[in-house]
Amino acid sequence: MSSGLSPWIEVPPGVFSEAGVYAYGVSEVSPVSPEDMRLYDNWISSGCNGGMQYMERYPDVRRDPALLLDGARSVISCAFAYRSSETHPGIASYALGRDYHEVLRERLENVAAALRSISGAETRVCVDTAPLRERYWAVKSGLGFTGLNGHLIIPGAGSYFFLGEIVTTARIKPSEQRYAPMECGRCRKCINACPAGALRGDGTVDARRCLSYLTIEHRGEFDSGTRLHGRLYGCDICGEVCPHNSSPVRCVIDGLKPRPAVMAVTVRSAAQMSRQEFSEVFSHSAIKRTKLDGLRRNALHIIDEETHYRRE
């Protein structure tokens, strides 16, 4: 007797590997679990999103990705490696290459086009731009688990990954959820290493303390006593101390690899940078998000901070 459901759509794995996807998993579209939504709602009500008011919007869509695309049946979660052997002392590794929003969208649009061709289904590509609980769906699809630092950790591969999703009306067989939402156990290395005390111990981060938030999203001057600990844009500390990142998967996508012009930026050069230099150095870069005024503010604060603590 027929169940009335359409057959599973098979997507050739080569479509993902050709796009540079390290790993992917599939989840059936359904409302987000009440437990996860409670954790998120408590995070918002505690003010831990700081000035990121956009994270309070569209609560109904965050609860149910079906609202992102009429007739949505599947969420495909994709992980792209970005860590290189080259690092910068003050700039987070993810921001050293071309803006990941652009790179991932181009590649996921190719995957989505192949899926539409195979199935005739509708698709919507999301790259950190839709109110979608990315790590929740990545865990549900079997990619990994959420660490105490809030990162998605892929066992054996680490956490230096961008996430991108394809929401589709295609009925694709779901992957098995292989890990509990959080499997860090008693390891608290990230919590102990965070110089700002931003990690709350439940997999969430208090943005008001987080150096990534302060150097990127925060607008205006810093509160008295704020220390940036040399961070010019973003922060990798909680990822660098994570045991799962002892041998991270390396970036294979040229567009995400560090660009010489960005690697050459110093605190001093950022403090003196002109608008033209900023536009040239950070063309198609995620660092443009902080704007020149924000980057200069960060640099000058670091210089003042270094001077202050040298005197003590």
Image (cartoon, rainbow, N blue to C red):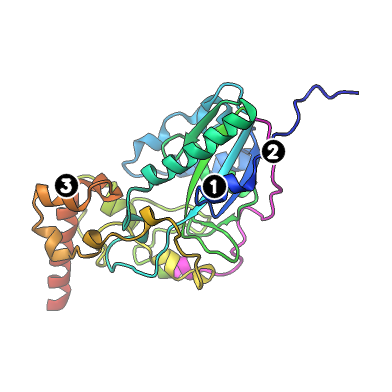
Circle 1 sits on which residue? Answer: 78
| Image spot of residue 231 (x, y percent) | 27, 63
Q: Nearer the viewer, residue 141 or 207?
A: 141
| Image spot of residue 212 (x, y percent) | 33, 55
Mark 1: amino acid:
Cys
Q: Nearer the viewer, mark 2 or mark 1?
A: 2
Q: Residue at image x 61%, y 25%? A: 120
Count residues near mark 1 (Cα–Cα under 10 Å), then give few for <14, some for 14-19, many for 20+. many
Query: Was residue 164 drawn as part of the magenta stretch in this picture?
Result: no
Q: Residue at image x 55%, y 64%? A: 157
Q: Residue at image x 48%, y 70%? A: 189
Secondary structure predominantly adopted by residues drawn in magenta: loop
Q: Considering the numbered disc 3 on the image, is that residue within a helix, a strand or a loop?
A: helix
| Image spot of residue 25 (x, y percent) | 62, 46
Report the disc number at residue 279: 3
Q: Which region shows up in magenta?
A: 170-192
Q: Is residue 207 above or below residue 159?
A: above
Within the image, what quadrant is residue 312 found in? bottom left
Circle 2 sits on which residue? Answer: 10
Q: Residue at image x 20%, y 46%? A: 291
